[in-house]
Amino acid sequence: MLAAQHWFELLSQSPLGLYMQTSRWAFAVVEMVHLLAIAALGGSVLLIDLRLLGVILKGESAKSIGRDLGRILLGSLVVLIFSGIGLLSEESMKCYFSPAFRWKMALLASSIVFYFTLHRRALNRAGTASPGIRQRAIAVVSMLLWLGVGVAGRAIGLI
Amino acid sequence: MTQPVLQHICQVIYDSQIGTTIRESDYAFSIIESVHVLAITLLVGSISILDLRMLGLILREIPVTRVSRAVFPITWAGFAVMVTSGLLLFWAEAAKNYLNPAFRVKLLLLLLVGLNPLIFHTSIYRRVAEWELQHRSPWRARAAAIASLTLWSGIIVAGRAIAYF
Amino acid sequence: MKAKLATSALIVATLLAAVPAYAHHSFAAEFDGSKPTRLVGKITRVEWTNPHSYFYVDVSDSKGKVSNWGCEGAGPGALSRRGWKKGDLKIGDSIVVDGYRAKDGSHLIDARRVTLPDGRSVYGGSPGDGGPGDNGTVQGNLPGTGKS
């Protein structure tokens, strides 16, 4: 099992990495795609979790809202992961050493796991009655986790 | 040496105490810029959901007015955050922004994206009760939705491009 | 509406096509690691600004001709965390800047290490950014140690 650092080095020296590092415009374009996908992901997370909180679309099925908006969430997540790998390949060693990047990956993993477990169960169980404390807590945790990914991502370039 | 009036105004704003403080700050600029970028989700993320509903792609069983009632407060909150943070960033960068083609394009697109709902709300949306239950909204509403998605995407791209000029 | 769409698409496409080579991201995209440069000169201008700081130095070449060079550094926040303060660089100060030239050939270098008049030197790279002097730490290799 190769050490993580070695994988980052491999990515840096891969054809993708070399292309991203030398191209005049590739990084800019990939970053813009990443940004557009953030808008889509953020919008879907916001509306799903505000429904869970019982703030909007009360009386509508949380499960079907979660299913519909979940498609946008997962679709944009896929775009974010692919574009993210592209961005990473341009500066993988800098990211490897960056505490902000490590936080972002930890928060991303947590967000994804949370989404497919507790969050999904809460959406499936949510009725049309006023949500209890557990359901509201799950909505808040979800929003904070995804927000954390965004903040950590910003920090990569600033620290 | 004469400058166009607008450029002179931008220079005055740029040189001001507040503009300079933000521009030379250790943390303020980074925080304001981060808020501006992350609030894109509040503003564009929310309105995109309404656009996709009218295009008949999501939440088809929910009437359009219910979706818009859920979305509009979020969009307006996002707009307030974007305008505030945007003005502060402009305050810090005004003289540079004046010369920046990406910034000019962004402003033009913002104007257009503001006209779009104006037209939409005074025409087809007036009769929303007639079509709000339809899975796919009438073509005028769909056109407004596509314009919204395209213009907002262009604004996000132009905003990012500011750093490259 | 169709005209508006087409116009928007055209604007976006033009913007993307017109983006110049200032990819402020990794060292390798904007600066040339095979062109190490040492500038010794007097500061003519300091821009202690976000998102990047810039300072300009007048450099005399061997024939005595003076040219002005720009040096790009990190923003004020990152610099202050390295121990710099806004007033550390004053117009007229003689400084030594070690860096690498911009790929587009302009008089711009990426300031990897700046030696201030009081003898202090400050490293400008980030750990792992791949630029010369990068050894994965915030101190970087000293120029001339042979480890670039």
Image (tube, grey):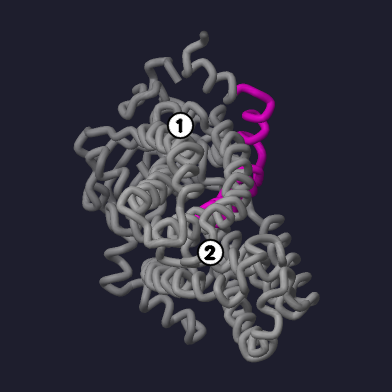
Q: Residue furthest left?
A: C118
Q: Where does residue B49 sit, x and y in percent of width and height?
A: 59, 64
Badge 2 marks a residue whose secondary structure is loop
Subunit under mark 2: A
Pointer 1 local density, CA inside 10 Å: few below 14, some 14–19, many at least 20:
many
Q: Considering only vertical position in the picture, is C118 above or below A44?
A: above
Identify residue for label 2. A60
Sequence-first tag of 1 and 2: 2
Q: Where does residue A51 sit, x and y in percent of width and height?
A: 46, 60
Name the residue rendered at 36%, 76% in the picture. Answer: B13
Q: Amino acid at mark 2?
A: Glu
Does the magenta portion include A23?
A: yes
Name the residue rendered at 39%, 23% in the picture. Answer: C136
Name the residue rendered at 41%, 47% in the picture. Answer: A142
Q: Considering only vertical position in the picture, is A58 above or below A106?
A: below
Q: Residue furthest top?
A: A1
C-alpha distance separating marks 1 and 2? 43 Å
Does the magenta portion include B46?
A: no
Identify residue for label 1. A95
**The magenta stretch spans which residues?**
A13-42
Q: Amino acid at mark 1?
A: Cys
For the C terminus of chain A, the image quarter is: top left
Subunit under mark 1: A
As rendered, which of A38 and A115 lies closer to the eye? A115
Residue B80 in view in this figure = yes
